[in-house]
Image: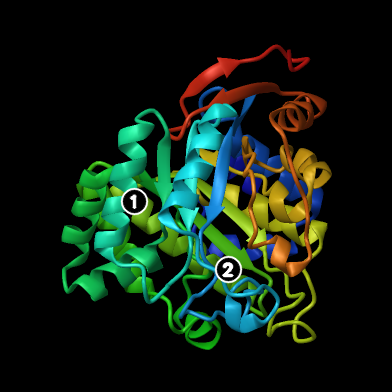
């Protein structure tokens, strides 16, 4: 199969053809991924967003085997932020130039749909211009179950309270993997139903993939096929983000080896080649660091994601990568692209010169 020829002509790679990509060289994958990436708008620029991540609790009933952050993992003491603490962090972020707040805290028994509505309404009333990228599909399913309502009603109520979009937090959309590693989270079907509900009410999400948990290449492609098929159906995804699991301090430590930079770049390129209907693919600096993120911009990526002030989940696994807006612009310019500060819908706020100024 000539993947470059298919992609450069705008063609779609079938699932069977994509299986052949496992044996492609890094150079071949980069060439095909970049051909796909350059087919989208603003090909010479790379986006980033100034945002804050608020991980408001680590008490989580999901207890995923690949997570070092939940309290039962024993690496971080149990905690739960008060509404006032969350509000103050939003206020500080706004004062520091953030345009987006990410809110995620897992499946906490005290956090209900009514609580989420009160919190969102309070934040949105005080900071109407802050884009609230909040909760995850599993959290939304948790809220709906607790309130005894359907997913569509739950999503509608969250939107009315002030939520703007939802992080895709998909882990791996492969039933046997989910049952083994994160069986208390939402099912694949529930995840896709949340996405359909979001789109019904005019909202968007991202699609993510956590890999390196012992899955096969075919299973990674099965995940990507769920994402591509749902995007064909709904158009709900603004971006795709892939990152390798960090097994340190988790139940996977000693069971799987951490995926290296080569596996990350290959997975990123395969994702870009296969996902022909998602415009933005992020380069995953949080787990891989800024240097690898720079290289990833030549493997199909066209966005470096957010600054993520105060992110704590990945740090619990012993990884402490950090970024500033200036760091982001430097990564982009060093890779030969023009930095583009963006908003939560990936629209341009400011286009910088190629030197980052």
Q: Earlier in the sequence, mark 2 or mark 1?
A: 1
- Per the model, the C-alpha gap separating discs 2 and 1 is 36 Å
Q: Would you say 264 lies left or right of 141 here?
A: right
Residue 197 percent coordinates (x, y): 24, 55
Q: Which mark is residue 220?
A: 2
Residue 194, visible in the rendered structure: yes
Which corner quadrant of the image does residue 34 belong to?
top right
Q: What secondary structure is found at the residue carrying circle 2?
A: helix
- The residue shown at (74%, 38%) is 298
Q: Residues within 10 Å of mark 2 (few under 14, many from 20)?
A: many
Task: Give left or right: position of 43 versus 108.
Answer: right
37 vs 115, nearest the viewer: 115
Q: Where 273 sits versus 126, above or below?
A: below
Q: Can you tell which of label 2 and label 1 is closer to the viewer?
A: 1
Q: Which mark is residue 119?
A: 1
Q: Position of residue 191 (x, y in %)?
A: 36, 66
Instruction: Please indicate whether residue 107 sits to the left or right of residue 304 in the image.
Output: left
Q: How many C-alpha atoms fall within 10 Å of the one at disc 1: few (<14), some, or many (≥20)?
A: some
Asked if one can make out residue 10 in the rendered structure from this viewpoint, the answer is: no
Front residue of 123 and 252: 123
Towards the viewer: 345 or 1:
345
**Residue 114 horizontal side relative to residue 330, left or right:** left
Residue 97, located in which quarter of the rendered image?
top right
Residue 264 placement: quadrant:
bottom right
Residue 326 vertical placement versus 203 (above, below): above
Q: Position of residue 179 (x, y in %)?
A: 47, 86
């Amino acid at each position: 199969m000539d993947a470059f020829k298919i992609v450069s002509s705008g063609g779609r790679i079938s699932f069977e053809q994509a299986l052949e990509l496992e044996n492609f060289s890094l150079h071949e994958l980069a060439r095909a991924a970049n051909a796909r990436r350059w087919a989208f708008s603003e090909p010479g620029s790379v986006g980033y967003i100034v945002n804050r991540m608020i991980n408001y609790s680590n008490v989580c009933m999901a207890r995923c085997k690949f997570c070092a952050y939940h309290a039962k993992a024993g690496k971080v003491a149990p905690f739960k932020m008060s509404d006032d603490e969350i509000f103050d962090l939003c206020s500080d972020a706004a004062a520091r130039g953030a345009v987006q707040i990410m809110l995620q805290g897992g499946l906490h028994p005290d956090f209900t749909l009514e609580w989420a509505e009160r919190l969102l309404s309070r934040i949105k009333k005080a900071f109407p211009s802050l884009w609230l990228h909040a909760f995850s599909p599993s959290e939304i399913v948790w809220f709906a179950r607790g309130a005894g309502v359907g997913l569509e009603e739950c999503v509608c109520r969250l939107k009315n309270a002030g939520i703007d979009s939802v992080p895709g937090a998909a882990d791996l959309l492969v039933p046997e993997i989910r049952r083994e590693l994160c069986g208390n989270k939402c099912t694949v079907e529930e995840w896709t139903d949340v996405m359909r509900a979001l789109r019904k009410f005019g909202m968007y999400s991202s699609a993510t993939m956590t890999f390196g948990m012992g899955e096969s290449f075919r299973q990674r492609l099965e995940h990507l096929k769920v994402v591509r098929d749902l995007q064909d159906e709904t158009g709900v995804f603004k971006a795709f983000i892939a990152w390798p699991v960090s097994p340190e301090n988790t139940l996977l430590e000693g069971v799987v080896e951490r995926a290296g930079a080569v596996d990350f770049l290959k997975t990123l390129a395969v994702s870009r080649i296969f996902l022909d209907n998602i415009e933005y693919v992020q380069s995953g600096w949080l787990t891989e660091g800024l240097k690898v993120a720079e290289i990833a911009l030549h493997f199909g990526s066209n966005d470096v994601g957010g600054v993520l002030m105060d992110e704590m989940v990945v740090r619990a696994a012993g990884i402490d990568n950090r970024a500033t807006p200036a760091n982001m612009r430097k990564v982009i310019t060093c890779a030969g692209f023009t930095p583009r500060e963006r908003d939560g819908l990936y629209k341009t706020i400011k286009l910088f010169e190629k030197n980052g100024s």
